[in-house]
Image: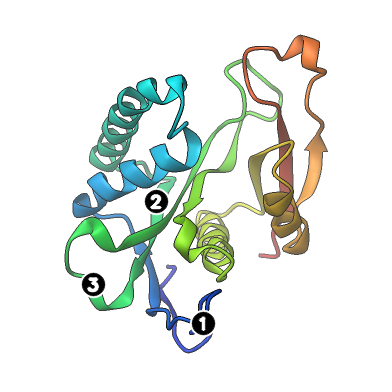
């Protein structure tokens, strides 16, 4: 079983020279709901402009989805969070990163591949980015998938998210499908499917 991982003494200085607090990766807990919903809504939905009017509604949906998945306790489904190490047993305000991994279909339509291990909702708070947190969250996902007996892992990335694509390429993911042409994908942001073969 995957064990909690401590980022101790590895990323101790921030981008402006300030001292950073140690980070611990652990499984999602009920007290993380509020902060996790805040982090995900801030990461994936507008925070300014007229579209931001809908963000509170999306945040409520995220909260309810997280709560439902926590209560149902999927056999092949986990949520990992990065927390400030000194506050592991305290309030949810310590959550600075999150990711989910589950076995599910990649599409709403039936496919020959069926259900596969899939990473979603990877987000890190802006003040804690570029410190290896996303990498460690993904490593926990990989170990979880191996523990379940799978040897591959999938995720989607926005076609214009170069930073995420550099990370995925660096750790062994390869593009499986390119985004649809813009005239076939007017209603949703374009995404690219990535896959990684795991060494079991």
Judging by the rendered image, the residue that carries numbered circle 2 is 79
Give 119 or 7, whichever is nearer the viewer: 7
Judging by the rendered image, the residue that carries numbered circle 1 is 17
Q: Residue at x 62, y 19 (%)?
A: 188
x and y percentages locating residue 57 in the rendered image: 31, 23
Q: Secondary structure at mark 3?
A: helix
Give 88 or 147, whichever is nearer the viewer: 88
Q: Residue at x 44, y 85 (%)?
A: 8
Judging by the rendered image, the residue that carries numbered circle 3 is 87
Q: Residue at x 61, y 29 (%)?
A: 106
Determine crowd level at label 1: few under 14, some 14-19, many 20+ residues with C-alpha closer than 10 A: few
Query: How far apart, in angstroms, are the residues tagged by discs 3 and 1?
Result: 22 Å
Query: How far apart, in angstroms, are the residues tagged by discs 2 and 1?
Result: 31 Å
x and y percentages locating residue 79 in the rendered image: 39, 51
- Specify the quadrant that holds the N terminus: bottom left
Determine crowd level at label 3: few under 14, some 14-19, many 20+ residues with C-alpha closer than 10 A: some
Relative to 25, 163 lies left or right: right
How many badges with numbers are in the image? Answer: 3
């Amino acid at each position: 079983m995957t064990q909690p991982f401590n980022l101790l003494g590895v990323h101790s200085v921030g981008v402006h020279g300030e001292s950073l607090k140690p980070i611990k990766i652990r499984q999602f807990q009920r007290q993380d709901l509020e902060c996790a919903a805040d982090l995900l809504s801030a990461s994936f939905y507008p925070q300014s402009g007229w579209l931001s009017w809908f963000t509170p509604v999306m945040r409520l949906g995220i909260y309810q989805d997280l709560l439902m998945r926590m209560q149902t306790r999927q056999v092949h489904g986990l949520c990992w969070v990065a927390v400030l190490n000194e506050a592991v047993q305290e309030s949810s305000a310590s959550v600075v990163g999150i990711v989910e991994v589950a076995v599910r279909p990649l599409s709403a339509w039936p496919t020959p591949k069926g259900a596969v291990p899939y990473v979603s909702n990877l987000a890190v708070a802006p003040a804690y980015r570029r410190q290896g947190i996303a990498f460690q969250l993904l490593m926990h996902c990989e170990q979880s998938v191996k523990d379940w007996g799978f040897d591959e892992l999938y995720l989607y990335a926005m076609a214009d998210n170069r930073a995420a694509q550099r990370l995925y390429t660096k750790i062994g993911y390869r593009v499986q499908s390119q985004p649809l042409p813009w005239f076939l994908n007017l209603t949703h942001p374009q995404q690219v499917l990535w896959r990684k073969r795991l060494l079991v």
